Amino acid sequence: MNNALLMLPDFGLILLGVLLARRLGFGRAFWEGAERLVYYVLFPPLLFTAIVNAKFSLATEGLMLSAAVAAFLAAVALSFAARWLLRPEPAFFASCVQTGFRYNSYVGLALAQSLAGPRAVALIALIFAVCIPLANVFAVYALARHRRTGMLREMAVNPLILGTVSGLVANLAGLELPALATTFLSRLGSASLALGLLCIGAGLTFASVHEERRTMVYLIAVKLLAKPAIALALIHAIGLTGMPALVVMLFAALPTASSAYILAARMGGRGAPVAYAITVQTLLAMATLPVWISLAPR
């Protein structure tokens, strides 16, 4: 119950985004501009500063990373298995397979801050530093393979990859930014959390999608049930406890990324079913996330 209360303000921002978009006259053009602002300008500095300023030790964080990455790769394998298990329509599969393993970084960072403060933000940012490039590789691969477009070009200009990789490189190199640069980037990053959550709410769509229901339900179950269950099993298997265990469970239980829609639309995929999956997962995660996090060993 305590975790649910701590998460309430962040989910409240998502619901406020719904209200602003549906009832208070903020049109789609406004939100499209806000989404681009968050995605290209505000969010990469948040990832960069969280990683570059963190104190990491592979001996300490290695187990945490191994559990998070293993759970993520298991979700990737289960998601791609839908192609053979359920035989979905190719364009639908190429667009929606990413919803089974991608995760909403905005929600993750906001909840990490609410649950455990800056240290948790740094730990989940470290997981993001490894998994964001991997998630984008698999998501872009599925769409590029279907559309026969260049995957390497898509990866090279992805702002989330650039922010996380550059932050990790700077951290490993021992780079110390000037105080003015740190303040500037930190304020950009801080602005991304609230605005990003508002954009998630504004982008939720309640239009029904009737096609490929079995595949849609399967991918939602992989993301919100199978992935955190696998993470929990791994946590117990390796004896992870405390904040690292909490962060792994938070990462594993996050709903799919709102940027999945942007990627599908930009690469010529099927945007409508992706938007529907984002909506359903975000709403369901309001109930499932507190439960999974409460199961993390203290």
Image (cartoon, helix red, strand yellow):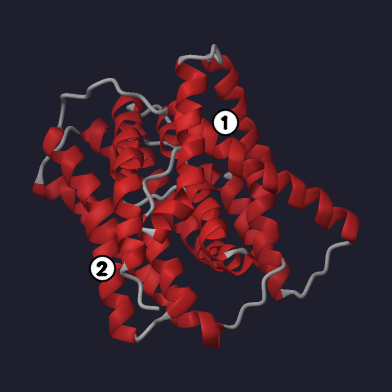
Toward the viewer: 154 or 61?
61
Count of numbered circles on the image: 2
Give the Cα distance between marks 2 and 1. Answer: 32 Å
Left or right side of 140 for 31? right
Q: Position of residue 213 (x, y in %)?
A: 14, 33
Q: Earlier in the sequence, mark 2 or mark 1?
A: 1
User: Which of the image's four quarters has the C terminus?
Assistant: bottom left
Q: Residue at x 61, y 69 (%)?
A: 119
The residue at 35%/72% (across/down) is 296
- In the picture, measured across the screen, residue 84 lies left or right of residue 46, that is left
- Occupied quadrant, residue 66: bottom left
Report the residue marked by disc 1. 35
Q: Are marks 2 and 1 in contact (CB under 8 Å)?
A: no
What percent of the width, then of the height, locates residue 146?
31, 36
Query: Residue shown at 46%/67% (left/top)?
Result: 247
> Mark 1 is on which residue type?
Glu
The circle drawn on residue 114 is: none
Badge number at residue 230: 2
Quadrant assignment, res 258: top left
Q: Looking at the picture, how far across and down is residue 200, in whole percent?
A: 47, 34
155 or 172, which lies in front? 172
Asked if residue 57 is positioned above or below residue 8 in the image, the reply reads: below
> Neighbour class for label 2 at 10 Å: few (<14), some, many (≥20)?
some
Q: Residue at x 51, y 44 (%)?
A: 9
In this rendering, is residue 118 above or below 212?
below
**Callout 2 amino acid:** Ile
